[in-house]
Image (cartoon, rainbow, N blue to C red):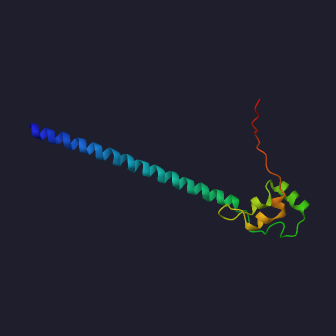
Amino acid sequence: MDTLSSILVFLTGVAIRLVIPILLTVLVVIVLRRVDIRWQKEAELERGVLIKDATPCWKEQGLSLDEIKSKAEASGAPCWQLHRLPNGYLREECLDCEVFLSAPVPEPKHAVTHA
């Protein structure tokens, strides 16, 4: 009887040391997959916002710098933000464009002041 209880205690210990880590690992995998699916859906929605339309660049449309600035003010975003690639990158043409290069550097809304 003593041998049987020792074997039972040993098997219970082995089961606990194996089953609990395996169950925790499976639980972490399930949670991470759900988070990944949620992030993929959010990325698809954000990608839809980034791709406004397939209209050509404002400069390619023959607009002057003043017209481009007024369009940017009306839309709330500069032209290179509205005409990003599907992956969110800027177009190569925008990096060399005088409108992009002459744009002011944005300032943070909440500037930290040190006294």
Judge whether 27 appears above or below 43 on screen: above
Q: Quadrant of the C terminus?
A: top right
Q: Residue furthest top?
A: 115
Judge from the rendering whether residue 98 lies leftward or rightward of residue 2; answer left or right.
right
The residue at 46%/49% (across/down) is: 31
Q: Quadrant of the N terminus?
A: top left
Residue 77, x across and y down, in percent = 79, 55
Residue 27, x across and y down, in percent = 41, 48
Q: Residue furthest front?
A: 115
Q: Picture quarter containing residue 8?
A: top left
90 vs 63, nearest the viewer: 90
Residue 113, x across and y down, in percent = 77, 34
Judge from the rendering whether residue 37 lies leftward or rightward of residue 75; answer left or right.
left
38 vs 84, nearest the viewer: 84
The residue at 82%/59% (across/down) is: 101
The residue at 89%/62% (across/down) is: 65
Q: Picture quarter containing residue 73?
A: bottom right
Residue 3, x across and y down, in percent = 10, 40
Q: How many marks?
A: 0
Judge from the rendering whether residue 44 lies leftward or rightward of residue 35; answer left or right.
right
